[in-house]
Amino acid sequence: MNALLPLLEGPVEEAARALLGCHLTANGVTVRLTEVEAYSGTGEDPASHAHRGRTPRNAVMFGPAGYAYVYFTYGMHYCLNVVTGVDGVASAALLRAGAVVDGLDVARSRRPAARGDEELARGPARLCSALAIDKSLYGAYLLDPAGPAVLTPSAEPVGKVSAGPRVGVTGAHDVPWRFWLTGDPTVSTYRRHVPRT
């Protein structure tokens, strides 16, 4: 059994923290995860895609843990979440940022607009772009060593972890469920959601 599975099966905020420092490998690139956000299940978390219940889009969020929930946003970007918690109850951790630790040239070729290597996977859409992740990964088991994307535990201590509000959510603005490696240059800039007028 993958050592991550028991951690991912716990409460979403604990599972999200456990993902920090883990490695995610896909399509010739590996990133070390430096920033994540936790999203709980129906009713209690209005920022969650599962807030109003199960739909064809969010069905994988209802478990079991360890699977990929990929969604398309703003008509142009993919974002990747790792499903957490117990089977039947929706929760997931959005992978917000990472540091490229292998496949640097490949990641650079996919992200030519990045001004430096710290920007290659800074932000959830950029992370997916650097790893060439799209909707085809939806529902894949991320703990399978033979899978198209593989999540492995951290081999080194993660150091200090900070927590704060999630980025750009329209509800539950101040819930401190964004976690990041303190001081890491790949962590994205905090922006609170501002409704359009």
Image (cartoon, rainbow, N blue to C red):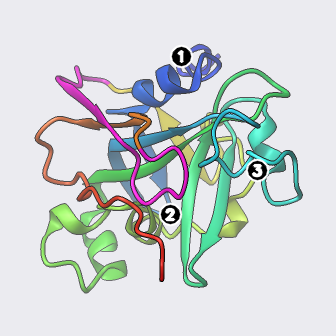
Quarter where residue 159 is shown: top left
Total label count?
3
Residue 175 sits inside the magenta stretch:
no
Q: Residue at x 41, y 63 (%)?
A: 193
Q: Which residues are magenta?
A: 155-173
- In this rendering, the answer to whether 186 lies above or below 88 is below
**Label 2 vs label 1: CA separation?**
23 Å
Q: What label does residue 62 carry, if any?
A: none
Q: Residue at x 49, y 56 (%)?
A: 169
Name the residue nearer the viewer: 25 or 160.
Answer: 160
Mark 3 or 2, which is nearer the eye? 3
Whichever of callouts 3 and 1 sits on the residue coming sooner in the sequence is 1
Local SS, label 1: loop
Q: Residue at x 59, y 49 (%)?
A: 47
- Residue 143, given in percent of the width and then of the height, sits at 62, 34
Residue highlighted by disc 3: 139
Amino acid type of the residue tagged 2 in the rendering: Asn
- Residue 114, given in percent of the width and then of the height, sits at 21, 78
Query: In the image, 87: left or right of 143?
Result: right
Residue highlighted by disc 2: 27
Q: Residues within 10 Å of mark 3 (few under 14, many from 20)?
A: some
Whichever of callouts 3 and 2 sits on the residue coming sooner in the sequence is 2
Local SS, label 3: loop
Quarter where residue 186 is shown: bottom left
Magenta stretch, main secondary structure, is loop
Whichever of callouts 2 and 1 sits on the residue coming sooner in the sequence is 1
Query: In the image, 37: left or right of 59?
Result: left
Local SS, label 2: loop
Residue highlighted by disc 1: 3
Amino acid type of the residue tagged 1 in the rendering: Ala
If the image is split into quadrants, where does the N terminus sit?
Answer: top right
